[in-house]
Amino acid sequence: MTPALTIPQAELTWRFSRSSGPGGQGVNTTDSRVELSWDVTGSAVLTATQRARLTERLGPRLVDGVLTVAASEHREQLRNRAAASRRLVSLVAEGIAPPAKGRRATRPTRGSQERRLAAKKQRGQTKQLRGGPRSTRRDDG
């Protein structure tokens, strides 16, 4: 998974079922849809911090502490297995990543304020030129 975390195969549960969608005659006979489940709350490889982050960030996706991903976009079970594994890896890696540093508030520089006001003035002049001849325009509001 990541250098810091490797999920053992014994903790993963695979389920296979028939997939919907294209596949011709084989779609009715092969179990190409894949569901990969991993018990986050019962896992022995997670630290307390990682477990807390995962349960907080993936809360709505967890059912009784179990994270499940499904893949059925390919016609072959092997490719769906790989897709489900990739999906689980990215979810877990995203979930255990440390929180991003907060933004330190800064004020806009004088130069950036002047450039912004100059651009606004320029846009206003451009729009004023689109008005057509002055004699046909009404300026009394």
Image (cartoon, helix red, strand yellow):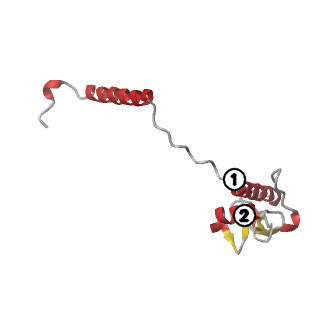
Q: Spatial distance from mark 2 to mark 1, Cα to Cα?
A: 26 Å
Residue 126: image location, x then y, percent:
31, 26
Discs 2, 1 touching: Cβ within 8 Å:
no
In the rendered view, tell whether residue 76 sits above or below residue 41: above
Percent x, y of residue 134: 17, 25
Vertical position of residue 98 compared to residue 46: above or below: above
Task: Give the amino acid at mark 1.
Answer: Pro
Q: Nearer the viewer, residue 136 or 98?
A: 98
Q: Which x, y percent locates residue 91?
A: 71, 57
Where is the C terminus found, in terms of image quarters?
Answer: top left
Nearer the observer: mark 2 or 1; the answer is: 1
Displayed quadrant of residue 86: bottom right
Return the x and y of residue 124 as percentages of the image width and height.
Answer: 30, 30
Q: Secondary structure at mark 1?
A: loop
Q: Which residue is mark 2?
A: 70
Residue ID for mark 1: 98
Question: In the rendered image, which quarter is residue 29 located in?
Answer: bottom right
Q: Residue at x 82, y 56 (%)?
A: 5
Residue at x-position 79% and y-position 70%: 15
Circle 1 residues within 10 Å: few <14, some 14–19, many ≥20: few
Dot 2: within a 10 Å radius of its alpha carbon, few (fewer than 14), some, or many (20 or more) residues?
A: many
